[in-house]
Amino acid sequence: MPYIYILPIENDPSPWIENLEKSIHRTFGYYSKLASPDICLEKTFDMKRMQYNSSQILLQMIASPPPDAEKILGIVNIDLFIPILTFVFGEAQLRGIGSIVSLHRLNNKFYGLPEDKELLSERLVKEAIHELGHNFGLVHCANQECVMKSSTYVEDIDHKSVEMCDNCRRELRSL
Ligand SMILES: [Zn+2]
Ligand SMILES: [Zn+2]
């Protein structure tokens, strides 16, 4: 039976894991497995940008996927970038096995606001479902409420729901 592997990389999953597993099962119908892989974040650090290269972490994550892994989702707590953008909340391989989401810019602390663990967990779940959606072949959606709508700012994440719109749901079933 295939699983969605969740890889908390150098952070404690206990505040958000339950929410995440529930949403993954509700949206994609898969159960999750937690794993702690051997990932070297240091190797992916860019000294000029003072950020971590998200694609390089992804490559390490999927280097030797477990045989029962349908998808592999990494969760980090560091600032991620891809070369063409100043930062990313996460990254996914379209129709691929791997995706990654960072808690760093989802945390109120980053914006100088008091921490809100519930809000952080909610944001993480939305971004994780979004990136997994790309893994399953979905592209961005124009529906403001849909989890597959792209988010530039954290406010955009708060504005959308954790659910897929009817169109994306239908699309997902047909893929
Ligand atoms: Zn996206
Ligand atoms: Zn949609």
Image (spheres, grey):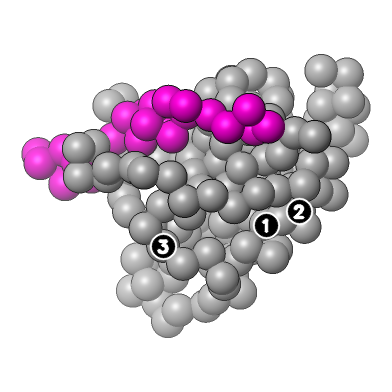
Q: Mark 3 highlights which residue?
A: 11
| Residue for point 70% across, 63% down | 19
Between marks 1 and 2, how big is the CA–CA gap?
5 Å
Between marks 1 and 3, how big is the CA–CA gap?
15 Å
- Foreground residue among 96 and 141: 96
Can you give x and y, in whole percent of width and height, for residue 79 in the image? 31, 50
- Foreground residue among 166 and 118: 118
* Amino acid identity at mark 2: Ser
Answer with left or right where residue 42 lies relative to residue 7: left
Q: Is residue 11 magenta?
A: no
Instruction: In the rendered view, tell whether residue 51 sits above or below residue 84.
Output: below
- Foreground residue among 43 and 136: 43
Q: Mark 2 highlights which residue?
A: 23
Contact, mark 2 vs mark 3 (Cβ under 8 Å): no
Task: Give the SS element for disc 2.
Answer: helix
- Frontmost of labels 2 and 3 is 3
Q: Mark 1 highlights which residue?
A: 20
| Residue for point 43% across, 34% down | 61
Magenta stretch bounds: 45-69
